[in-house]
Image: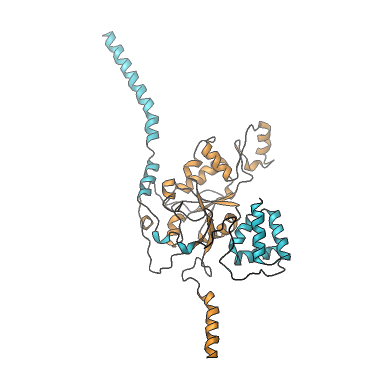
Amino acid sequence: MVVNSRYTGQCLTRLILLFVCCIPLVTLASDPYMDALNAEADSVAVDPASEKQEANVFDQAPTLGGWSNDAQSMSQDLPANLEQEDFEESLKLNFYGSYIFYKRLDDASQAKVYEYYQDNPSIELVRQRIMELKKSR
Amino acid sequence: MMNRMVLFLVVFFLAGPLAALEVQVSEGRDQVQVIHEGELVKIRRIQDLNHQITGGFAKTSRKCPPFCIQPLVVAPGVETVAELELFAFMEDELAGEEGFLIDARVTSWFEKGTIPGSINIPFTVFELKPDDPKLVEALQKLGGKKRTDVSDFSRSLESLGLMGGDKKTDYWDFNQAREVVLWCNGPWCGQSPRAIRALLELGYPAEKLKYYRGGMQMWQVFGLTTVIPGS
């Protein structure tokens, strides 16, 4: 009788230990929120009509070495004698690709571009200067 | 004959401005440009006036919870923005590499299509333990600096607001933190709100965070350009 009750006690202890050990595993295996998210994602796609097409990409990709056309303005010259703020605005409005790279330069390099523009108000030359400074960063 | 030629020339030169798209992104603007995966992408709207949304974003109803309507203000101090503010962010902070546009959805959503200019950092990354390499990498990308061996004396001074202490925690210095706009699937999506709350818990300054609540749902409603990552 004593043996039986000891045996039952041992079994019970093992069962409890097993149960306690399994709790974290069950928790890890199933996160209802993540399950719902992934299940929903399987059934959803963006509207194909909204996907990027040829018309959404510039003919010449703006790689650091290859940028040569903003495809935005036919003008070859920037207005002369602009203040730096107006120069930036003019770049933004008319040559956005160049403006993006200009904005990625640090303040000192931006000042160098502006200084260069004052002597050379040609977008072609300004663009070359921006790319030189971009590459030398 | 001469008059016809003059008329032709006038029409020809006026054709540029008149050729503006019928469905503009905002009044007077055909497109917004942004760099995505090294490529300059023009964000435009679908031009078909009869087009209706197809695909998963046409659904009206999902189980709530978990897909519940989110509040307008996700946390105190975090600004909620809409499309026009997002365009301005793309042209200024994003173009100047001073900010990040974060698609906070889990990768299974991101892979289906994202907003141009976005990078994917799932909200789950921001909920990892403070020393998890993925979290450390993400926060460093956003301008956070990992701190080690911070003395009690330094923390005492910082707690008084000295030494830029209002943007420092035991683990992180967020004084150089970038501006970040986070978004997910739209007003019914809790992923970016969770990311924002987790970032705030980590000490990221609220004024550097913005919540684009419209997310992919409103982006699709307006027929704005999406990109499939890696395509």
Q: In the rendered image of this protein, which colour is used for chain A?
A: cyan
Q: Quadrant of the N terminus of chain A?
A: top left
The colour scheme is by chain
Return the residue nearer the eye: B140 or B213. Answer: B140
**Above or below, comparing residue B111 to residue B151 in the picture:** below
Q: Residue at x 55, y 79 (%)?
A: B13
Residue extending farthest to the top is A2
**Where is residue A123, by image quadrant?**
bottom right
Seen in the image, is A39 located left or right of residue B166?
Answer: left
Q: Residue at x 70, y 61 (%)?
A: A114
Seen in the image, is B106 located left or right of residue B137?
Answer: left
Return the residue nearer the eye: B148 or A97. Answer: A97
**Does the rendering let one see residue B44?**
no
Residue extending farthest to the front is A66
Q: Residue at x 38, y 61 (%)?
A: B53
Q: Position of residue B145 (x, y in %)?
A: 61, 40
Q: Position of residue B75 (x, y in %)?
A: 52, 48
Return the residue nearer the eye: A77 or A48. Answer: A77
Seen in the image, is A13 located left or right of residue B131?
Answer: left
How many labels, in total? 0
**Where is residue B61, by image quadrant?**
bottom left
**Above or below, comparing residue B149 to residue B89 in the picture:** above
Residue extending farthest to the left is A1
Q: Position of residue B105 (x, y in %)?
A: 45, 48
**Above or below, comparing residue B191 to residue B49 in the picture:** above
**Does the rendering let one see residue B46?**
yes
Tell me which chain appears orange. B
Q: Position of residue B194 (x, y in %)?
A: 48, 45
Seen in the image, is A59 located left or right of residue A91?
Answer: left
Return the residue nearer the eye: B108 or B78. Answer: B108
**Where is residue B149, by image quadrant?**
top right
